[in-house]
Amino acid sequence: MMFKRKSRRVPSLNTTSTADISFMLLIFFLVTTNMDIDKGLRRQLTPTGKDDVQQSFVEKGTTLRLAINAENQLSLDDKPFPMDKLRYEVENFVKRVGKRHLVTVSVDPQASYDTYFAMQQELVAAYRDLREQTALRLFGNHYAALSQAQRDKVKDDCPQRIAEQYNGKGEMQ
């Protein structure tokens, strides 16, 4: 006996529109998401070149030596120093020595980036405060309100002189 089988059709979903919707959602999130998360230190580095290496001599009293060891401890002129007082110490040092000052920084490779970054933030804050005071003294106006020529004069009167030393072992060169 022969039975006639009825062929059943398997229902299918139209997935074309699903791919289109997924693509549109991807584009939407790429366009609306903020991916500008720059973090770091804003510095103008000197150009590299083997011919322009200059050796300079610095007077002993014009140098402030900062170091961070592997245990994340800050030292100032080889003596332990608290991070929260660094800004005021740098300000006083620069005021005392003037344009001839030099701040040297040495960081052990095992030190944490957070400690290094905190030290750099204190240095930046010290120079910002010094330039603000210089702008008020010279021009009677805040640094942010000065013209570019006036800002250049303030930067010339209060240069940011920071030298970082690193030889791969965390020792001063």
Image: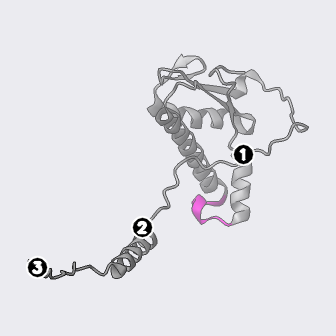
Residue 79 x, y percent position in the rendering:
54, 17
Residue 151: which quarter of the image? bottom right
Q: Earlier in the sequence, mark 3 or mark 2?
A: 3
Q: Residue 32: horizontal and vertical position, in percent?
A: 42, 72
Mark positioned earlier in the residue sequence (2 or 1): 2
Image quadrant for the N terminus? bottom left
Mark 3–mark 1 distance (CA, rounded to whole Å): 88 Å
Residue linked to disc 2? 33
Queried whether the magenta region covers residue 137, the answer comes back as: no
Q: Amino acid at mark 1?
A: Leu
Could you tell which of marks 3 and 1 lies nearer the N-terminus? Answer: 3
* Left or right: residue 116 compared with residue 61: left
Residue 37 coordinates in the image, percent (x, y): 48, 56
Circle 2: residue type: Thr
Question: As drawn, is 99 to the left or to the right of 17?
Answer: right
Q: Amino acid at mark 3?
A: Phe
Q: Tags 3 and 1 in contact by the CB under 8 Å rule?
A: no
Residue where numbered disc 1 is placed: 45
Q: Which residue is mark 3?
A: 3
Q: Indicate which label's residue lies in the foreground, 3 or 2.
A: 3
Query: What residue is at 58 percent from the left and 62 percent from the top?
Result: 144
Q: Position of residue 5 (x, y in %)?
A: 14, 80
The residues colored magenta run: 139-147
